[in-house]
Image (cartoon, rainbow, N blue to C red):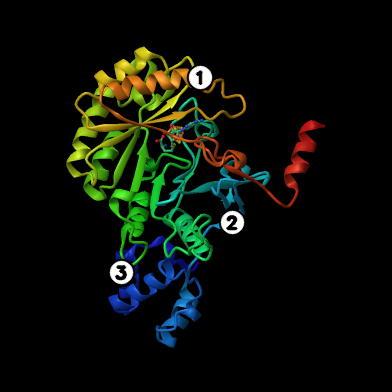
Amino acid sequence: MPQNLLDFDLAGLTAWFAERGEKPFRARQVFRWIHQSGVTDFAQMTDIAKSLREKLQSEAIVQVPAINYAHVSADGTRKWLFDVGPGSDAAADQAWRNGIETVFIPEDDRGTLCVSSQVGCALECTFCSTGRQGFNRNLTVAEIVGQLWVAQHSLKTEPNRTTGEIAERPVSNVVMMGMGEPLANFENVVTALGIMLDDHAYGLSRRRVTVSTSGLVPAMDRLAERCPVALAVSLHAPNDALRDQIVPINRKYPLAELMAACRRYLVHAPRDFITFEYVMLAGVNDQPAHARQLIELTRDVPCKFNLIPFNPFPDSGYEKPRAEALRVFREILQDAGYVVTTRKTRGDDIDAACGQLAGKVADKSGRVMKRIHREAA
Ligand code: SAH
Ligand code: SF4
């Protein structure tokens, strides 16, 4: 099997080169060709000696995940569906293949890419369609970084919709808020983050790369040590009784421990606040009393709130909050001095909103239809 060079950060690539008697600066050149120039064909790496290019051709590849489709929404939001191979439940019947989604959200002053870290998720938050699918597998480094590679290199040839300019680096921000729990795929995510930050690759600022976690406390501490980037914590409830219900990982790491972990993280973080994400579920966690409890809970944690109106999906059992409930909730937090943003829903027409990302790709060979027919018979 040839080695996929997209699986390596610069240290890993340098070590792989060293095993083959190649100097570190050669590894750096190849790394830059791959990530900065978007070149996957060794023959096009013109400043690399022909003998090395030939060696690379026989031992290595640069392989990004296969694109199943790319959609553009009316508001400019883009979504890619990548095919990342057969699903584990499809061993006997290859009807489904694993899919992961990546969303690009263009704004005037930045371009944010929402990146997936796992196929499915084991944590089973009750309002999340990824959680409902269950866990399939962790993404590899190549599959995580590959999402950024595809977005950066396909978007940089296109003019900005408002300004008409061609941006050198259209993706300025990355949020690990796609499918999966990034801290449950710790090593691969940390390696991928390192590549995103590396000046020889994408050179993103630590402040512009955000990991979103549902609250895996020990992994938050390890992230602070290994790769402190901006942190978003999916809070969603102001007390343990409610959070135990809707974010089941809370039974393992309850709120007092989570708040303490947030305070510890801030010692290392590139920003001086934690972003608390709060999905607003009508009648469940959107009452004024919940907002007042949140103020108590987060008293000692410098933070901002990001309120996310629930995005419905079939059979979710939840409803979007009423506009009035959202307004009252926001005002209670704002009156207490908090900075509160309400996430606008983008890319609604292409199902690219939070919690709507799908995890399966229908096998294009038609076996899906055969299976459906068989089951219906
Ligand atoms: N696993 C990580 C990151 C991925 S989810 C986490 O939970 O933080 C990114 C955000 O989308 C999380 O805050 C998550 O709770 C939220 N989300 C999930 N399902 C949603 C839905 N149906 N509507 C709105 N937000 C949702
Ligand atoms: Fe997993 Fe995050 Fe969805 Fe919870 S909200 S099930 S942690 S992806």
Tell me: residue 241, above or below residue 150: above
Q: Is residue 254 visible?
A: no
Tell me: residue 278, above or below residue 61: above
Q: Nearer the viewer, mark 3 or mark 1?
A: 1
Identify residue for label 3. Answer: 15
How far apart are labels 2 and 1 at the CA level?
Answer: 37 Å
Q: Residue type at mark 1: give it.
A: Arg
Residue at point 43% right, 41% down?
177
Label located before the other in sequence (2 or 1): 2
Identify residue for label 1. Answer: 322
Residue at point 30% right, 55% down?
205
Label located before the other in sequence (3 or 1): 3
Label located before the other in sequence (3 or 2): 3
Residue farthest front in this picture: 163
Tell me: residue 191, above or below residue 296: below
**Discs 3, 2 touching: Cβ within 8 Å:** no
Q: Residue type at mark 2: give it.
A: Ile
- The residue carrying pointer 1 sits among few (fewer than 14), some (14 to 19) or many (20 or more) residues within 10 Å by Cα, namely some
Question: Which percent across, then down, holds residue 198?
Answer: 31, 62
- The residue carrying pointer 2 sits among few (fewer than 14), some (14 to 19) or many (20 or more) residues within 10 Å by Cα, namely some
Queried on whether the Cβ of the residue with tag 2 lies below 8 angstroms from ligand 1, the answer reads no
How far apart are labels 3 and 2 at the CA level?
Answer: 30 Å
Identify residue for label 2. Answer: 67
How far apart are labels 3 and 1 at the CA level?
Answer: 56 Å
- The residue carrying pointer 3 sits among few (fewer than 14), some (14 to 19) or many (20 or more) residues within 10 Å by Cα, namely some
Tell me: residue 333, above or below residue 203: above
Residue farthest right in this picture: 377
Question: Which percent across, then down, holds residue 354?
Answer: 49, 36
Question: Which percent across, then down, holds residue 247?
Answer: 41, 25
Pick the residue in front: 162 or 114. 162
Residue at point 75% right, 40% down?
371
